[in-house]
Amino acid sequence: MAARLRTLPASVAPVLVGTALGARDGDLRPLAFAAALAGAMLIQVGTNLSNDYSDARRGADTEDRLGPVRVTAGGLVPPRQVLIATWVTFGLAVAVGLYLVAVAGWELLLVGAASILAGVLYTGGPKPYGYEGLGELFVFAFFGVVAVTGSYFVQTEQLVWEAFALAVPVGLLAAAVLMVNNIRDRETDSRAGKRTLAVRVGAQGARALYAAMVFGAYVLLPITWLAGALDVWVLLPALTLPLALRLAAEVSARTDGPSLNAALARTGLLQLAFCVLLGAGVLLSG
């Protein structure tokens, strides 16, 4: 429950896109791909555990929240055990990262350290950025730009502009996952002093931002095709647009916890489906 395994598509999806582009531009490194995938998932699980521990300490996870029960605040697991699990998980991520540094370059050491630090400081530390309305920005950066370009670098040991262009729609959908989560928790977060972006812009503003993030991914999708870098196959994710339209309508209209929990899960699946199709389109463009 504390690891929130259902959120893992957010870490898997960008690795698939970056690796697909890397395989297109060179030979696939299967072990490096597996390590990048494992590292991304471990960092996300560590972040989730850290979030569970830190939010409970700050009183953000109250009994009246609409989301699933958190194990620390709910008394299901002692806080010390959650904290130990957090650092064990991050320790495993470091071990995987050291392998990637050995096979692809020292630059990945900086990427891994920054990713773990961002995971801890999301709700931990003296001034957590998740409490200041910066969560979506950091998710866009680390589950979009960093994850896609880092996965590409693992395969090729270089960076190209196409990796950054593909990372933008991926990051927007990752940010949309967090946005719908924060829309659901807006009222309880506000009472706990957690000034997420949804709290800062209000209910209607948050729903508008969610729609902008989701549809922005589709608007920016054709960039690499229009620039002549990739073939029209890169537009395959447009097949998921009907799901995006339904989700935007649902998030706009519903305020109850079960509906928003379902929208959260489906937004994660939308991101995964979008990225699977995007990765397939990149490979077909070769």
Image (tube, helix red, strand yellow):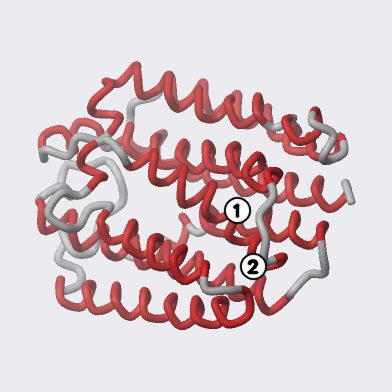
Residue depicted at x 50% and y 23%: 212
In the shown orientation, is residue 188 left or right of residue 155? Answer: left
Residue 257, x across and y down, in percent? 33, 36
Label 1 packing within 10 angstroms: few (<14), some (14-19), many (20+) = many
Question: Marks 2 and 1: in contact by CB < 8 Å?
Answer: no
Q: CA–CA distance between discs 1 and 2?
A: 10 Å
Which three-letter amino acid code belongs to the residue tagged 2?
A: Val
Say above or below: 71 vs 68: below
Label 2 packing within 10 angstroms: few (<14), some (14-19), many (20+) = many
Residue 126, x across and y down, in percent? 12, 54
- Say which element carries label 1: helix
Residue 276, x across and y down, in percent? 71, 50
Residue matched to label 1: 148
Q: Quadrant of residue 15?
A: bottom right
Residue 1 visible at all: no
The disc, 1 or 2, on the residue closer to the chain's N-terminal end is 1
- Say which element carries label 2: helix
Residue depicted at x 35% and y 18%: 205
In the shown orientation, is residue 128 left or right of residue 281? Answer: left
Say above or below: 192 vs 107: above
Q: Which mark is residue 186?
A: none
Q: Which mark is residue 154?
A: 2
* Closer-to-camera residue (205/169): 169
Say above or below: 119 vs 106: above
In the shown orientation, is residue 54 left or right of residue 44? Answer: left
Which three-letter amino acid code belongs to the residue tagged 1?
A: Val
Residue 185 visible at all: yes
In the shown orientation, is residue 27 left or right of residue 7? Answer: right
